Amino acid sequence: MTAERQGPLAGVRVVELGGIGPGPFCAMLLADLGADVVRIERPADAGRPSEHPVLHRGRRSVALDLKSAAGADAVLRLVDTTDTVVEGFRPGVAERLGLGPQICLERNPRLVYGRMTGWGQDGPLAQTPGHDINYLALSGVLGALGQPDREPQPPLNLVGDMGGGGLLLAFGIVSAVLSSRTTGRGQVVDAAMTDGAAIQLSLVHGLLARGMWADRRGGNIFDGSAPFYRTYRCLDAEYVAVGAIEPQFYQALLVGLGLATEPLYANQFDVAGWPAMSARLAEVFASRSRQDWVAHFEGTEACVTPVLSFAEAAQHPHNRARGTFTEANGLLEPHAAPRFDGTPTTPAPAARLVGADTRQVLLEAGLDVATVDALCLR
């Protein structure tokens, strides 16, 4: 495999055993930062456009039947010279395919084998199907989200799948690759979305331990109950977000709203007074349009921002100035993050047609022409 991309991971080689959701997100992050990622996909999909053109950007696509001995052997040939494998099957599936970590590490002792699951490789639920919402429920995240008199509200699939899954696995893989290059020993990285969701609660657990968080939905500083940390509906039915936690920002908010002298707001952290405080703020914010409030608070430290749609976010002046979103590959997509001044990344190539690089990648791996021809005809 070649490494033509630029970025801090240039030269790192990755084999991604095609999956959905967090696994591809992990591989996208690695590719965004310069890694040479080869995604293994099903032959039945060969020639088709990617179903996930953003998540699948930046890597080459190889179509192989992993259930066949020849397909599995071809993958092992790729594993021989790669730095890491990204795998997101249910525990035990990779082993049954002959592609589990034991055989891969025997062939390549420096290999980092990254495993992405919801529940982890062991434990009573390891073989149980689930999705982001289930992992959030069991880790304690979901029970804290939403209004106390309503059902819990999942935050899209960001906290479990992407943050607690793909991002955690990418961090684990990079850490293990660093260790491998130092010690010469590879290892398995077991990334479970329940673990990843739980570790994101570290701040909250610290507040719980100090008696500064109630173990229930509602009545807490970050869950939409605090009048200074929530959203408000404006005159035009759009919303603004308020995040004025620190005293100086809270004061700037009150000054901007003309409420600085009202006794109701004298004690910012009077939880019993929060409903009345919020109700009054709701009345004030409902008196003007979202854009009026944005203009009104511009240049202040009140921590008031518009709640934007995806399309609006891409056009916001700050995001445009930083290039947070790009229109590369004919799509609106998030730019690679974070930024590196010494090893800047290059724009990720568009997602390839499924199997578009099968022949080239397998020949690079040292398979003979006849074997490659046979695999490409399957």
Image (cartoon, grey):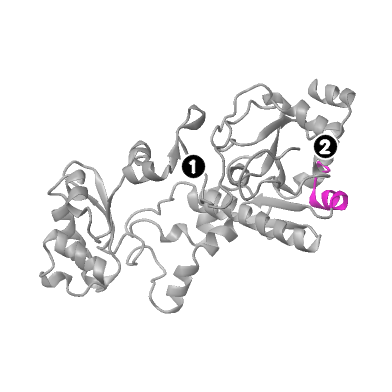
**Residue 188 lies in magenta, yes or no?**
no
Asked whether residue 64 appears in the rendered view, the answer is no
User: Callout 2, which amino acid?
Assistant: Ala
Q: Residue at x 69, y 25 (%)?
A: 356
| Residue 72 numbered tag | 2
| Residue 270 numbered tag | none
Q: Nearer the viewer, residue 124 or 33?
A: 33
Q: Secondary structure at mark 1?
A: loop
Asked whether residue 82 appears in the rendered view, the answer is yes
Q: Is residue 309 left or right of residue 330?
A: left
User: Which quarter of the rendering shows the N terminus?
Assistant: top right
Query: In the rendering, at what x and y percent does residue 166 appear?
Result: 59, 50
Query: Would you place residue 94 above or below residue 269 in this image?
Result: above
Query: Which residue bears the numbered disc 1?
Result: 335
Q: Residue at x 85, y 22 (%)?
A: 374
- Answer few, some or many: residues within 10 Å of disc 2's Cα (few below 14, many 20 plus, some between 14 and 19): some
User: Callout 1, which amino acid?
Assistant: His
Query: Would you place residue 239 above or below residue 182 in this image?
Result: above
Q: Residue at x 66, y 27 (%)?
A: 354
Q: Is residue 164 left or right of residue 98?
A: left
Q: Nearer the viewer, residue 6 or 157?
A: 6
Query: In the rendering, at what x and y percent does residue 58 appear?
Result: 61, 36
Quadrant of res 236: top left
Q: How far apart are labels 2 and 1 at the CA level?
A: 34 Å
